[in-house]
Amino acid sequence: MQKKNNFLEIIDQFFVVHGEKIEQKGEDSFLISVNERAGLAGVFDGCGGSGAKIYKMFGEKTGAFIASRVLSEVTGSWFDSSWDEKEQIYRISGATLKNAIDARLAGLKQKSGTGTMLKGSMTKEFPSTLAAAIVQPGGKGLLADFLWSGDSRVYVLDEQGLKQVSVDDLPVTDAMENLRQDAGMNNVVSASHPYQINVRKLKLDQPCIIFAATDGCFGYLRTPMEFEKLLLSTLLSSESIVQWQNALDEQFRNIAGDDYTMSLMSVGYGSFRKLKESCEKRYRYMERVYPLLPDTSEQELFRQWAVYRPDYEIYQKRDET
């Protein structure tokens, strides 16, 4: 593939799928930003349990509601400021993003007048997950930076299948086990508790799909294989990018017991038809190897997961700085 330095020449489509369990009270937020240099897709899931406190000075909204939207705003501004004019590249740093977030959350905390919280308290000030992917041209391929904190995820999908890049900030990192547990996160953005922003840098081949998703998109399915099949089946049954977006929204709305948000970029295919064509073989393979029938036993599902898992987690073992 010929080298192209203008990102707008290689990105095909980008969109957001977003739904609220309770209208006007959804605690998910999102960000998508595309320019001639790069693209960013991000999602932010306000933690409604630990962030349920209501702030009168912020329109009677919960800390979780406020946090997800503030993180979206701060991440967008940080992205814009990360361009290195001399080197003509985005310099992506989890530390600088965290500094920007911390400064903004400290301001919110001061404005809200909240006092010191007990160490170890389950309640957090303005807690939210963060998951974002920044993609820019890099030679014949792509330079991709993935950042996350919490259990929202960043993924890559191509003709070889679905790969989860992030590692869940949960006591157990097995994606299959986490569909069967309700463990609390051990790392998440907040104004009152220590946290970190994980970063993974990868070199990706074109074409591919890069996206971020909150747990409402994948957390109500039986297996990670079922999530890939949902993505592929809705894609192949659609005749346009808008139809695919709407089909995903319908599927998530039907299965999710929570807010759901996905922010997605498709890069390097050239057309929606070629995007579909590139995924047809993979979908046939998934149907044959992972049929996932309603009466499939747990034992059989875990056997299939053991086969699927090494490729699904392959990017979790890499970090190409």
Image (cartoon, rainbow, N blue to C red):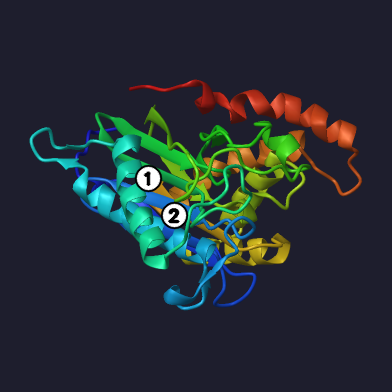
Residue 157 or 314: which is nearer the viewer?
314
Depth order, front residue of 218/55: 55
Q: Residue at x 64, y 49 (%)?
A: 122
Residue 267 disc label: 1
Disc on the earlier residue, 2 or 1: 1
Which three-letter amino acid code belongs to the residue tagged 1? Val
Q: How many residues crowd mark 2 within 10 Å: few (<14), some (14–19), many (20+)?
A: some
CB of mark 2 within 8 Å of CB of mark 1? no
- The amino acid type, in three-letter code, at marker 2 is Phe
**Residue drawn at (24%, 29%) of the image:** 139
- The residue at which mark 2 appears reads as 272
Determine whether 213 is above or below 172 in the image.
below
Disc 2 versus disc 1: nearer the observer: 1
> Along the horizontal axis of the image, is 75 left or right of 279?
left
Please say whether residue 261 is visible from this viewpoint. yes
* 319, above or below 111, in the image: above
Q: Quick one: SS at disc 1?
A: strand
